[in-house]
Amino acid sequence: MSYQIGPDMRVTLHFAVKLVDGSIVDSNFEKTPATFEVGDGQLLPGFEKALFGLKAGECKEISIQPEQGFGMPNPNNIQQMKKTDFAAELELQPGLMLSFADANNSELPGVIRMIEGDRVEVDFNHPLAGKDLLFEVRILEVIPQ
């Protein structure tokens, strides 16, 4: 029996997430396939819903808008910090990604956007926020959970 991707299904697939210019953000085509259960939170809901109806053996490239992907950038996620908040030996420059601890002591990535005098602007938005993405998939197996 050939099952379609939908609620209560376990899916094994190869995938690639690309920017619209074709550059690859993440891919497991050359690695072990990924397996997830629909609704388990491993995939963003917009990515997961785009797979509904596909069966084992199917390949598809799906366009994912920011609202279904990593969302739109939030201006509140851009923070102003002081140079003295960073280790003295750290060479600060725009584009540098650093790891910060959030209020729960979880790791939070931030990208330096700008340095002006003693002020450092750090963007804590997801790096793919606001980006249109292409989600390429090859479905290997679809079975009931």
Image (spheres, rainbow, N blue to C red):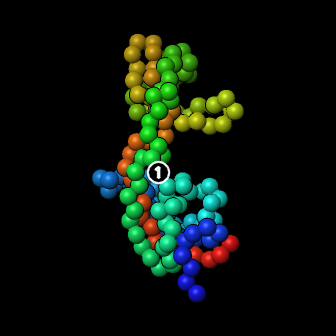
Q: Secondary structure at mark 1?
A: helix
Asked whether residue 129 appears in the rendered view, the answer is yes
- Amino acid type, mark 1: Gln
The part of the image, by quadrant, that contains residue 38 is: bottom right
Q: Residue at x 57, y 66 (%)?
A: 34
Q: Is residue 18 above or below residue 128?
A: below
The quadrant the C terminus occupies is bottom right
| Residue 15, position as x, y percentages in the image | 47, 64
Is 56 rendered above or below residue 117? below
Q: Is residue 29 visible?
A: no
Q: Position of residue 54 (x, y in %)?
A: 48, 73
Residue drawn at point x = 42 percent, y = 47 percent: 66
Specify the quadrant of the image occupied by residue 63: bottom left
Residue found at x 51% / y 32%: 124
**Image point 63% across, 31% down: which residue?**
101
Q: Quadrant where the N terminus lies?
A: bottom right
Q: Residues within 10 Å of mark 1 (few under 14, many from 20)?
A: some
Judge by depth and name the residue closer to the eye, 135 or 51.
51
Q: In the image, is residue 10 above or below residue 85?
A: below
Q: Residue furthest left?
A: 21
Q: Label 1 belongs to which residue?
A: 68
Task: Report whether 72 appears left or right of 11.
Answer: left
Residue at the bottom extreme of this rendering: 1
Report x, y in % for residue 127.
Answer: 45, 41
Q: Quadrant of residue 3?
A: bottom right
> Percent from the top left, x then y, of residue 141?
56, 77
Q: From what the image shows, is residue 141 above or below residue 29? A: below
Residue 5 placement, left or right of 69: right
